Image: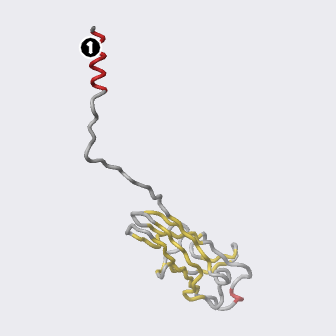
Amino acid sequence: MKNFLITSAAFALLSAPAFAATQGTLLLQGQIDQVLSLTVTPEVGVHDSLDLVAGESDRKVAVVNEQSNSNTGYKIFLRTTNAGFLKNGTLDSVQYSLSYDGSDVTLSDTDEQVKSVTTGGVYDNNSDVAVTIAGSVSAAALTQGTYSDTVTFTIQAN
């Protein structure tokens, strides 16, 4: 009899009508990953044929495309292998200066900040890179050969 009462009580509980709520919610969401990229596009026929004798004055040598969707903004850093000198091996060198997006930059073999975007958002920006070289008295004042330096750009979220 005891088993019958327990079974009857369990059946009554299980067969009780279910009460529906009058309201419900559904959370919808998605995720966007961080985009942080930079593309350097050299000016064809310019970046690799600089006039070391006559010099160059604010000559555009490249465009850097900066893309970011960081919610904290981003920074651009620049460094050069030879700290602002075009070198002909160990024989000779010619000093130069650069501007990035219209602002003069410090040339160093360590990362130097050249741009800071402090507001988060979606960015697709092109920044010009221009070179200035004082020039030499004559070609005879420089050792024959190719003079070069490598410039490295880095983008980083704030």
Quadrant of the rendered image containing residue 89: bottom right
Indicate whether 92 appears above or below 75.
below
Which amino acid type is shown beneath numbered disc 1?
A: Leu
| Residue 128 percent coordinates (x, y) | 53, 80
Question: Which residue is at 49% across, 75% downward?
Answer: 125
Compared across the picture, whether 26 is left or right of 80 comes to: left
Indicate whether 122 appears above or below 137.
above
| Residue 49 percent coordinates (x, y) | 68, 83
Compared across the picture, whether 134 is left or right of 105 comes to: right
To which residue does mark 1 refer?
5
Quadrant of the rendered image containing residue 121: bottom left
| Residue 55 percent coordinates (x, y) | 61, 89
Q: Residue furthest top?
A: 1
Quadrant for the C terminus in the image: bottom left
Quadrant for the N terminus in the image: top left
Indicate whether 142 appears above or below 156.
below
